[in-house]
Amino acid sequence: MTSCELCSSRASLYCEADDAFLCRRCDRIVHGANFLALRHIRCFLCGTCQNLTRKYLTGFR
């Protein structure tokens, strides 16, 4: 299992700019901190195998 680098729960996103795997909760905290971090493009992980998918997230959702 790929763990969130901040809280150790199951990761659901990868941010290449930060080189970090994050859960959704920690992603909101990290990328909601300022407008520059908010522009980072994050890649969703597959819910089953946790490989990177072709689904991306930008902004705050």
Image (tube, helix red, strand yellow):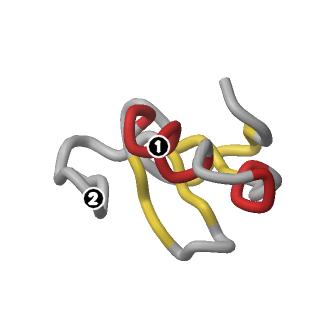
Question: Along the polypeptide, which appears first: circle 2 or circle 1?
Answer: 2
Task: Identify residue type, mark 1.
Answer: Ile
Residue corresponding to mark 1: 29
Q: Residues within 10 Å of mark 2 (few under 14, many from 20)?
A: some
Q: Is residue 14 left or right of residue 56?
A: left
Residue 17 lies, in percent from the top left, at 68, 73
x then y, percent, for residue 44 = 59, 41
Task: Residue 5 in the image: state x and y as whole percent.
Answer: 30, 63
Residue at (58% x, 73% y) in the render:
18
The residue positioned farthest toward the front in the image shown: 34
Quarter of image, res 9: top left
For label 1, the SS is helix
Q: Single out the residue that lies furthest toward the left.
A: 8
Q: Amino acid at mark 2?
A: Leu
Quick one: SS at disc 2? loop
**For residue 36, side relative to residue 2 (left or right):** right
Instruction: Find residue 45 and report its horizontal and vertical position in percent.
Output: 51, 44
**Residue found 70% across the figure and 32% down from its top:** 60
Structural distance between the alpha carbons of marks 2 and 1: 10 Å
Mark 1 and mark 2 in contact (Cβ < 8 Å)? Answer: yes
Q: Residue at x 58, y 53 (%)?
A: 52
Q: Which mark is residue 40?
A: none
Label 1 crowd bin: few (<14), some (14–19), many (20+), radius 10 Å: few
Residue at far top of view: 61
- 19 to the left or right of 38: left
Residue behind mark 2: 6
Name the one closer to the observer, 51 or 30: 30
Quadrant where the C terminus sits is: top right
Task: Using the rendered view, name the quadrant where residue 26 is placed.
Answer: top left
Which residue is at 30% across, 54% downward? 4
Q: In this rendering, is residue 33 above or below 48?
A: below
